[in-house]
Image: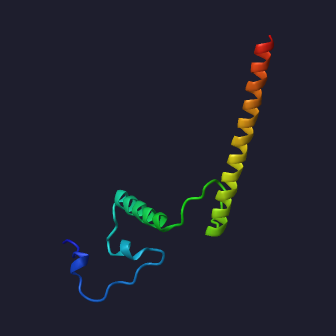
Amino acid sequence: MSDPDPRERSGAPDAPSEGARPAEDAGVVLPRPIQEHLGQQLRTTYNAEAPEKPAYLGDTSLPLEFELQLQRLEASERRRLREMAHELGTQAVEQALRDFKSG
């Protein structure tokens, strides 16, 4: 004689065994690929709601006023380096032209 289908049992459900998950007790376990897919979707949703990625490793999230000040400081530093490189390049070309003319 066959055992009755657990879904057709009448009466109160059995108490879940200790350490077992309720889904396993009910016989409802999703296949591993589906679990992984749903987990990936959950991580994607969670990461989409997270703040922006840091600009570099170790970057902390800064308030907007600090971020704007840092951007201005970086732009100023880049401008200073460009001007210094331009000046050194101009001097090098002038010196090369003088050497060429005299030589």
Q: Nearer the viewer, residue 53 or 92?
A: 92
Tell me if residue 15 comes above or below residue 103 in the rendering: below
Residue ID at (70%, 56%): 73
Q: Examine the image and state in which quarter residue 64 appears.
A: bottom right
Q: Nearer the viewer, residue 23 or 48?
A: 48
Residue 100 visible from this viewpoint: yes
Q: Nearer the viewer, residue 53 or 66?
A: 66
Q: How is the image coloured?
A: rainbow
Residue ID at (42%, 63%): 39
Left/right of residue 40 with respect to residue 87 in the rendered view:
left
Q: Residue furthest bottom?
A: 11
Residue 9 in percent (x, y) is at 24, 82
Left/right of residue 75 with respect to residue 36 in the rendered view:
right
Tell me if residue 103 comes above or below residue 34 in the rendering: above
Residue 82 in percent (x, y) is at 69, 41
Q: Residue furthest front?
A: 101
Q: Nearer the viewer, residue 12 or 21?
A: 21
Tell me if residue 12 comes above or below residue 76 in the rendering: below
The N terminus sits in image quarter: bottom left
Left/right of residue 76 with respect to residue 42 in the rendered view:
right
Residue 103 in percent (x, y) is at 80, 10
Residue ID at (76%, 27%): 92
Residue ID at (30%, 89%): 12
